Amino acid sequence: MLTEEQIQKIELKATEIRKDIIKMLLSAGSGHPAGALGMADVFATLYFSGKLNWDPTDPWNENRDRVILSAGHICPVWYATLAHAGAFSHELLLTLRKIGSPLQGHPHYRELPGIENTAGPLGQGLSQAIGQALAARIDRRGYRVYAILSDGELQEGQNWEALMFAGKNKLHNLTVIIDRNRIQIDGQTEQVMPLEPLVAKLRAFNWMTAEVDGHNAAEIEAELEKARKNTQGPVAIIARTIPGKGVEFMEGNYIWHGKTPNQEQGEEGLRQLRSLWGKLAEE
């Protein structure tokens, strides 16, 4: 279990990551804020709670845990997290989406330390992660694979074939974290193409499934620990998140899925996040 001090550090780190996301998008003039802001707590907990076996000073060690980002459009949260972990300099973050920058608009395999997959078309990352997890079994290696999926991309059929495959093969070294923010580019997921009852569906495909508050580090860490100890089959953690978390005018509004804030909006978002950081630091 995380101590109160550890939880506070993760919350502060998530707020710093959110600030970096806004700065990156303002510099780029394009990008996807809602999902990136919403998943900051999940990324901060995964990388800074001690659950991930990954060393930024030896990023390609054969026994490292792998993180696969299927929802490639939220890559600013991944880039910012990796920078905070020490994989590369913070200055590089402001080159997001610039010509020649390794911080592309969607992640590119090994372009940066820790980037384990190329993403762009949605619905592909789970299959990539399954390949990695199966390879670990074949090679008798002990690393774990974590796949980050959006809920909207679960509307694609390939995911359900992949879910069947992983369940059938009992890939217990695979953990999927689903960003259940209930939005996609055209509106609410339950209006565009309903996913519920999602927990029941995943369990029917032989996945050990849990739901967590995606902004609660203690809950996220507890389920990651259960997944790490699990030997029965693949694990799905459904993280209930608020898109645009931390920036009031973005929160819960699907319009911000792929809309970048202008300078005034960005400055207001940063003001709110600085205020939040100050409150967390005082606790």
Image: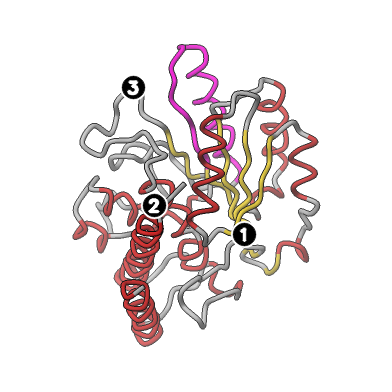
Q: Quadrant of the C terminus?
A: bottom left
x, y percent for residue 250:
52, 77
x, y percent for residue 268:
38, 85
Q: Nearer the viewer, residue 227 or 97?
A: 227
Distance of mark 2 from mark 3, alpha carbons? 21 Å
Q: Which residue is mark 3?
A: 62
Say few, some or many: other residues with alpha carbon within 10 Å of mark 3 (under 14 / 14 to 19 / 20 or more): few
Q: Describe the element under mark 1 as helix, strand or loop.
A: strand
Residue 239 shown in magenta: no
Distance of mark 2 from mark 1, alpha carbons? 18 Å
Q: Nearer the viewer, residue 45 or 135?
A: 45
**Up/down of 66 relative to 199, above or below:** above
Q: Are marks 1 and 3 in contact (CB under 8 Å)?
A: no
Instruction: Identify which residue is drawn at 32% across, 75% down.
Output: 282
Q: Which residue is mark 1?
A: 240
Q: Is residue 247 left or right of residue 273?
A: right
Looking at the rendered image, the disc whose residue lies closer to the viewer, 2 or 1, is: 1
Say few, some or many: other residues with alpha carbon within 10 Å of mark 2 (under 14 / 14 to 19 / 20 or more): many
Amino acid type for the residue under numbered disc 1: Arg
Amino acid type for the residue under numbered disc 3: Glu
Distance of mark 1 from mark 3, alpha carbons? 32 Å
Say few, some or many: other residues with alpha carbon within 10 Å of mark 1 (under 14 / 14 to 19 / 20 or more): some
Instruction: Identify which residue is drawn at 31% across, 72% down.
Output: 281
Q: Which residue is mark 2?
A: 78
Amino acid type for the residue under numbered disc 2: Trp
The magenta-colored residue range is 123-147
